[in-house]
Image (cartoon, rainbow, N blue to C red):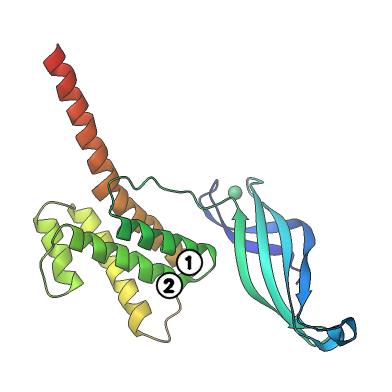
Amino acid sequence: MSKTEFDVYCPECNILIAAQVVAEGNGGFRSNAINPFDEIDAEYQGEHYFVCLCGRCSQPFLIRQSLYGVPAEFETVTDEVILYPSEKRLPLDGAPSNIKSAHEQATRSFSASLFEPCVLMCRKCIEATCKTFGAKGRDLNARLQSLFDAGHIDSRLLNWAHEIRLIGNEAAHDPDIKVTKRDARDVLDLTESILIYVFSLTSRFEKFRARRSMASTKR
Ligand SMILES: [Zn+2]
């Protein structure tokens, strides 16, 4: 399907931008037809590739559209994935595997423009963080407070976590809610910041301190 621009998140500009299509090409089609004479009204699937440039910084993007249709009747885009640049992988050192996997699912949902699943998985990251530290309370609201009381997060991260909890709740319980790309991006970034602070930086600081104390005993 021909398009002249795509709304994408530019990692260089750090904002949503309209990337202009500068080249496109057909990635091939697969027909369900048994013989070539049936191909004219048989369902088909295919891919279309687009090269786009950010209008502000010229960052290139490679986008793949998956298509489904019937010749001369209809064609729909079933999936749209940004193949390049790939989402930056965060070194979530020290985070348990269930949190790493929830975070990866949130990132993949975002890349596939699935914004409700993205914020749901972000909320799950926060839930799992509470569980990892044995936070007490009958709901996530209370467990976050317990995480704060025990000193695992500070008041700013507590506020961020509450916002992630609320948007996650809305996405889970309100069938009419539509999470925007911008909100999903913010929720993903805030979730990552909390995970980096709670797990990666904590484990890095402990290693740093151990190294320092080793060095000082040698002196
Ligand atoms: Zn840009």
In-front residue for pair 32/117 = 32
Question: Mark 2 packing: few (<14 Cα in 10 Å), some, or many (20+)?
Answer: many
Three-letter amino acid code at the position of disc 1: Ser
Residue 183, quarter of the rendered image: bottom left
Label 2, ligand 1: CB separation under 8 Å: no
Label 1, ligand 1: CB separation under 8 Å: no
Question: Mark 1 packing: few (<14 Cα in 10 Å), some, or many (20+)?
Answer: many
In the rendered structure, the answer to whether residue 12 lies left or right of residue 56 reads: left
Q: Is residue 190 visible?
A: no
Task: Please identify the residue farthest to the right as the structure is shown.
Answer: 37
Q: Residue at x 31, y 60 (%)?
A: 98
Picture coordinates of residue 196, whole percent (x, y): 31, 48
Q: Is residue 193 above or below residue 98?
A: above
- Cα distance in 3D space between marks 2 and 1: 6 Å
Report the residue marked by disc 1.
109
Picture coordinates of residue 82, whole percent (x, y): 60, 59
Query: Along the polypeptide, which appears first: circle 2 or circle 1?
Result: 1
Task: Please identify the residue farthest to the top as the structure is shown.
Answer: 219
In the rendered structure, the answer to whether residue 26 lies left or right of residue 83 reads: right
In-front residue for pair 132/113 = 132
Report the residue marked by disc 2.
117
Picture coordinates of residue 41, whole percent (x, y): 82, 88
Q: Is residue 177 visible?
A: yes
Q: Quadrant of the N terminus?
A: bottom right
Q: Quadrant of the C terminus?
A: top left
Q: Are marks 2 and 1 in contact (CB under 8 Å)?
A: yes
In the rendered structure, the answer to whether residue 14 lies left or right of residue 98 reads: right
Picture coordinates of residue 36, whole percent (x, y): 88, 81
Three-letter amino acid code at the position of disc 2: Pro
Q: In this view, does 120 lie above or below 173?
A: above
Q: Please tell me whether mark 2 sits on a helix, a strand or a loop.
A: helix
